[in-house]
Amino acid sequence: MAKEFTFTYEERLNMAAQTAEILTEEIGLKGDAIQAVHLIPELETGHISLEDVESQYGESVSRILHGLDRIHQLYEKNPAVETENFRNLLLSFAEDMRVILIMIADRVNLMRQIRDSQDDEAKRAVSLEAAYLYAPLAHKLGLYKLKSELEDLSLKYLEHDAYYLIREKLNATKASRDAYIDRFIKPVEEKVKAAGIKCHIKGRTKSIHSIWQKMKKQKCDFEGVYDLFAIRIIIDCPEAQEKMQCWQAYSIVTDMYQPNPKRLRDWLSVPKSNGYESLHITVLGPEQKWVEVQIRTERMDEIAERGVAAHWRYKGVKGETGLDEWLTGIRTMLESADGLEAMDQFKMDLYEDEVFVFTPKGDLYKFPLGSTVLDFAYHIHSKLGNQCTGGRINGKVVSIRQELKSGDQVEVLTSTNQKPRQEWLKIVKTSRAKSKIRLALKETQVKDGLFAKEMLERKFKNRKLEMEESAMFHVIKKMGYKEVSDFYKSIAEGVLDTNAVIEKYLEIKEGEKVPTGDNVARSAEEFILDETKAGLNLPVNDDVLIIDRNLKGIDYQLARCCSPIYGDNVFGFVTINGGIKIHRVDCPNAPELRRRYGYRIVKAKWSGKGASQYSITLRVIGNDDIGIVNNLTSIISKDEKLVLRSINIDSHDGLFSGNLEVMVNDTMRLEGLIKKLRTVKGVKQVERI
C-alpha cells in the first residue's frame, strides 16, 4: 500500500476484500494468495506475526507476506521507480510471483478508492507509480484489462482535462464509430469466409490513455488521431496452414482497401523475440479513414492473451527475452489447476546471475552475481575505485571484498593513501573494474619505476660513483630480473635494497678483491665513533636541515624561486640529477610540483639554531618623501647582524617602489626587520618576495 495515504483498520479490511476480489475475478488466483491478502491488515496492525502466520496458515502464506514486507522495505530506499532496473529489482525481490500479482491488484484497488480524495499531491504520487511501474508489470504479465485501467486512471488523476476531453469525444462518437466498424467488418468477413477461411472478426476502441499518447506523439488534436480503433481477424485453422491462411486474408483486405506499406508489421515470418506472432496493416477504409487491421490465428491470439506481452518492446519499453518467456510460463501456471499447486513451490530465479544495488541517493545499478564493493566503487568513478578502502552496506562497515546482494544500499569509503594492488584483480567481477585496475597499476608502476631509478641514481651520486648503463644491465641480469621495469619495481616496493644493488655493481665493475693490508676485516670493537663526523656533536648555532626521515648531511640547494631561509616551513624536491632543492611551503611553484611530481617530494625541516646568513628580497612601497630612503637604510645599518647587499628604487607620481636585498640569519630576525620598516613614516607596504 502506498505510504502517501492512511486508512483505518476497518477501511483496510474492506480494501483487502476488494483486492482479493480483483485477484480472483481478473487474475484467477485462489487459495494461499487470497488468504495472504486478507491477513495483510492484521500483520500491519501487529495483531499477528509472520511466525504466527506460518504456524496457523502454512509456509506458503507466510512466504507471500514476507515477500510483501521485503517490497515495502525496498520502497523505503526511495528509488526511481520509473527505471527498468527498478522493475527488474522488484521482480527479483518477490520470492513468489503472487507477491507481484497482489501488488498490481492492490494498486488497481487503491486507484479506484482515491477517486474522491482531496489530497492531490498524494494522488499524483500514487498515479505516477501506477503509470511507470504497475501498468508495465501488468502488461508484461498479460493482464491487459488491469493494465489499461491503471493507465486510464493515472491519466485521469495526472491529466484531468485531457482525460475528460477524450472520454467525452469518445462518448459523442461511439454510435457512429460502432456503425463504421460494422460497415468495415461485414464485407471483409463475407469475402474471407467465401475464400474458405474460417474466422471471426471483432473491433475494439483503443483506451483513453493510448489515444492521449498518440495525440502527444503526433502533436494533433482528437480528430487528428485516425486509428481510434483496430479490427482483429482471428482465423481458426490447423497450425500447418496458419501462415498461408493469414497471408490469404491479408491479400483479401489489401485488395479491398488501399494499404499503407509503411505501416506493415510482419511478425508472422519472423516472430518477436517474446514469441508474438501476427500481421498488422493499416488500410484506407470507407470515407477515407485509416483503419488498423490485425490478422492472426486462434493459437497466436491465445498466446498473446496469455501474457507473452505482445506489445512490450513495440511500445518502447525495453525487456529481456528470458523474462518474457518466464512470465509466459507463470501466466500458464496461473491458468491451470495443477499450476496453482506448482506455484506454491515456485521461487523467483530468473535473476540468479544478477544483483541490483542502490547508492545512498537512491540511484539503482545492476551488477553480475558475485560483484563486490570494489566493483561498485569502480562503476561509479575510477578515482573512487583507486582510493577505495571498503564500504558501508546498509549502514554496516565492510571490506572491499564484500559481495553485493540485491537491495543493498552501498556507500564507498576511501583514503588518499590507498593505491590499487595486483590482488585486486582477483577481487572484482566486472570487466570494467578489471580494466581500470590494470590501467591504474600500469600508471603506478611507471611512476614508481621512475622514482626508484632516480633514488638509485641519487645513492650512486652520494657515494661518488658514476652509474654506467651497460654495467647496470649486467647487474639487473645477475640479480635475476628479466625486465628492467620489474627490477625498479622491486626497489620501489622495498623488496630490493639499493645498497645491495650498489655492492653488486661494484663487484661486477671491479671484481672481488683479496683482503690485504688495511683491507683486512677487523672487529667493530677496535674502532671509536667520531661523534663530530657523525653529526652527533654539532655546534648549537649551526644550521641543520633534516630531510625525509631524520636524514642529515645530505647535499641540498636552496631554490631561487622562493629563497627559503632558516625558520621557513620547507620541503625537499628530488631533482632529475639526484640532488635535492629546498622550497618554501608557500612557494608559488609548490602546488604544481605536488600535483605533477608528488612522488619526488620529501619532508624537510630546520634544526639547531640559525647562524648562517641568507639573502632575501623585500619589496617596499611608500610616499616619495625626502629622506625616506635614508631612514630605511639606517634601520638596516644599525643592526650589526643585518647586511644590505643592494637597493633599487623607482619613483613615479609622488610614490616610490623598490627592492631591498638583505642578508639575514632566520625568519625571526626577518620579521623584526619588516616590523621596523613598516614604522617608517610614509611607508605603505613591506613584503617579502
Image (cartoon, rainbow, N blue to C red):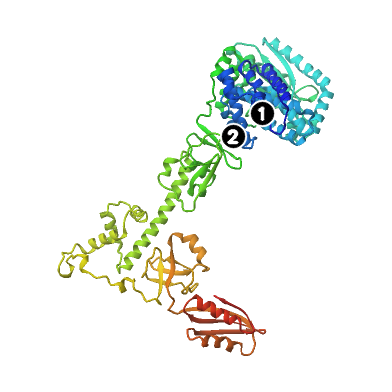
Residue 473, visible in the rendered structure: yes
Residue type beneath disc 2: Asn
Which quadrant of the figure has residue 185? top right
Left or right side of 71 for 548: left
Which quadrant of the figure has residue 130? top right
Residue 269, visible in the rendered structure: no
- Circle 1 sits on which residue? 134
Residue 146 vs 657, above or below: the answer is above
- Circle 2 sits on which residue? 85
Q: Residue at x 48, y 86 (%)?
A: 640
Q: Residue at x 20, y 62 (%)?
A: 511
Residue 426 vs 658, above or below: the answer is above
- Across and down, in percent, residue 579 comes to 39, 68
- Across and down, in percent, residue 258 comes to 73, 24
- Across and down, in percent, residue 650 comes to 60, 84
Left or right side of 576 for 460: left
Give 450 or 128, whichever is nearer the viewer: 128
Identify the disc placed on residue 30: none
Residue type beneath disc 1: Tyr
